[in-house]
């Protein structure tokens, strides 16, 4: 996997966390650098941890499904991306202004479940997992911190667009993997 592909994948994965960070920014009177670090650490940390767990699981089962791994990668990324696109059309999220462990942990897990599935695809793609999780974690940290500030400053205007763009990126990455494996892309 090339750096640009990994970068785009990381941005796509971080869009759920970005969208929730925008909502958190809406919920607070004043977003502080401490708030930005908390949001970035939770979301970036879990976005890095989940693909690592998925990778370790994928490595265990790789030998059994190597002949269909490209289809699995395509389906997982298409489902995750499609779900993000669908979620971009609803305004169901209501968040409180707390940054406590009991508030942030479920949000961090919920926004990183898709990264677990992507980690499984990393096992099939023979990706450099340490570089991948560092890249995903750092990009999510930054985008989450920025999302908090955007939400606090500009409002919910960008939430649905971020999820829509992230979903499109993941679907396109899945299509690219499938087309490369089938020999349509060199």
Image (cartoon, rainbow, N blue to C red):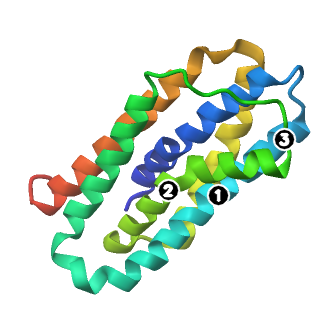
**Do the residues bearing badges 1 and 3 touch, measured as CB atoms within 8 Å?**
no
Q: Which dot marks residue 46?
A: 1
Report the residue at 46% width, 73% height from top.
Answer: 55
For residue 81, what is the image quadrant? top left
Tell me the mark number nearer the camera, choosing from 2 and 3. 3
Q: Nearer the viewer, mark 1 or mark 3?
A: 3
Say few, some or many: other residues with alpha carbon within 10 Å of mark 1 (under 14 / 14 to 19 / 20 or more): many
Which residue has dot 2 on it? Answer: 115
Q: Position of residue 53 (x, y in %)?
A: 53, 72
Separation of disc 1 and disc 2 at Cα? 9 Å
Q: Are marks 1 and 2 in contact (CB under 8 Å)?
A: yes
Q: Secondary structure at mark 2?
A: helix
Query: In the shown orientation, is residue 93 left or right of residue 163?
Result: right
Could you say where residue 54 lies in the image, as x and y percent from the top left? Answer: 47, 69
The residue wearing badge 3 is 99
Q: Residues within 10 Å of mark 2 (few under 14, many from 20)?
A: many
Residue 46 percent coordinates (x, y): 64, 58
Where the C terminus falls, by quadrant? bottom left
């Amino acid at each position: 996997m090339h750096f640009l592909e990994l970068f785009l994948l990381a941005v796509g994965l971080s869009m759920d966390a970005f969208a929730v960070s925008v909502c958190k920014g809406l919920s607070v009177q004043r977003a502080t650098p401490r708030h930005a670090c908390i949001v970035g650490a939770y979301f970036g940390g879990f976005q890095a941890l989940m693909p690592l767990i998925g990778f370790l699981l994928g490595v265990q089962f790789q030998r059994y499904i190597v002949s269909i791994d490209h289809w699995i990668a395509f389906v997982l990324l298409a489902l995750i991306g499609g779900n993000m696109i669908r979620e971009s059309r609803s305004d169901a999220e209501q968040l409180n202004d707390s940054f406590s462990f009991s508030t942030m942990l479920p949000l961090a897990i919920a926004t990183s479940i898709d990264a677990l599935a992507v980690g499984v695809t990393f096992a099939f793609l023979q990706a450099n997992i340490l570089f991948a999780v560092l890249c995903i974690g750092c990009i999510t940290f930054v985008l989450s911190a920025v999302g908090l500030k955007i939400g606090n400053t500009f409002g919910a205007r960008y939430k649905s667009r971020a999820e829509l763009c992230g979903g499109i990126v993941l679907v396109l990455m899945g299509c690219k993997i499938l087309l490369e494996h089938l020999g349509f892309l060199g």
